Image (tube, rainbow, N blue to C red):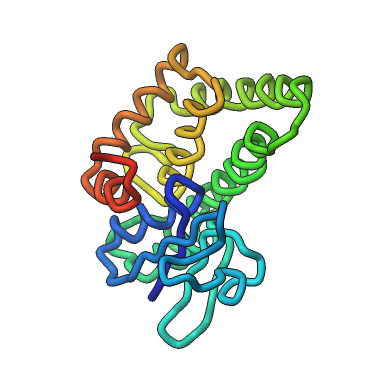
Amino acid sequence: MKLYYSPGACSLSPHIVLKESGLPFEAIAAPTKTHKLADGTDYYTINPLGYVPYLVLDDGRTLHEGPAIVQYLADLVPDKKLAPPNGSWERYKLQEWLNTISTELHKGFSPLFTPGMPDAAKEIAKTRLNSRLQWVDGELAGKTYLMGDTFTVADAYLFVVTGWGKYVAIDITGLANLGGFMARVAARPAVQDALRAEGLLK
């Protein structure tokens, strides 16, 4: 299978999950600024939406939403416990986390990366993001990861999105639980492999 990604974008989440899974895959850079692949191919001819992540299976089927992609990957390797079993209460809690990260955090960062966004709008976005991150910090109290002691696909997503804070002056140094979480995830070998593959870790 192929994963189209842009370095440091939300596609880093499935990239991490693929590294954690041990599944064979090809990672193909599709920079969101140029939408051109290394060989000059117009990325829009591959994914008409133009964004990442984009997963293409060997039989040609595709997925283009991160939360769906990471759950699909997790279900290919159930022994890795990257997601609780389908139908279980824990699986719905995982989906709750994926949706919260997607709508409350991921999209919350969008105004801060949008060229020409008025400063007043950015300040509103920052205030809201800080509030949400404080709530996540509280939810992590006494836990190693979002779901407890087991690393899941939701942790990969939270790690990636929270990591954007350093680029837009969102400071989490006062959030001890979240800071500890970020350090634990960053130390995982598969996470380091993905970061290195995207040129984000020397």
Q: Looking at the picture, does residue 16 appear above or below residue 116?
A: below
Quadrant housing the C terminus: top left
Q: Looking at the picture, does residue 60 appear above or below residue 19?
A: below
Q: Looking at the picture, does residue 115 appear above or below residue 2?
A: above
- Pinpoint residue 43: horizontal percent, then vertical percent: 55, 69
The answer to which of 29 and 159 lies nearer the viewer is: 29
Residue at 44% x, 45% y is 8
Residue sticking out furthest to the front:
40
**Total of numbered circles in the picture?**
0
Quadrant housing the N terminus: bottom left
The answer to which of 140 and 59 lies nearer the viewer is: 59
Q: Is residue 198 left or right of residue 162?
A: left
- Pinpoint residue 157: horizontal percent, then vertical percent: 47, 45
Residue at 34% x, 42% y is 200
Q: Looking at the picture, does residue 184 appear above or below residue 74?
A: above
The answer to which of 12 and 103 lies nearer the viewer is: 12
- Pinpoint residue 72: horizontal percent, then vertical percent: 46, 67
Q: Is residue 187 left or right of residue 168?
A: left
Residue at 56% x, 52% y is 33
- Pinpoint residue 165: horizontal percent, then vertical percent: 51, 28
Residue at 33% x, 56% y is 81
Residue sticking out furthest to the top:
174
Q: Is residue 189 left or right of residue 117?
A: left
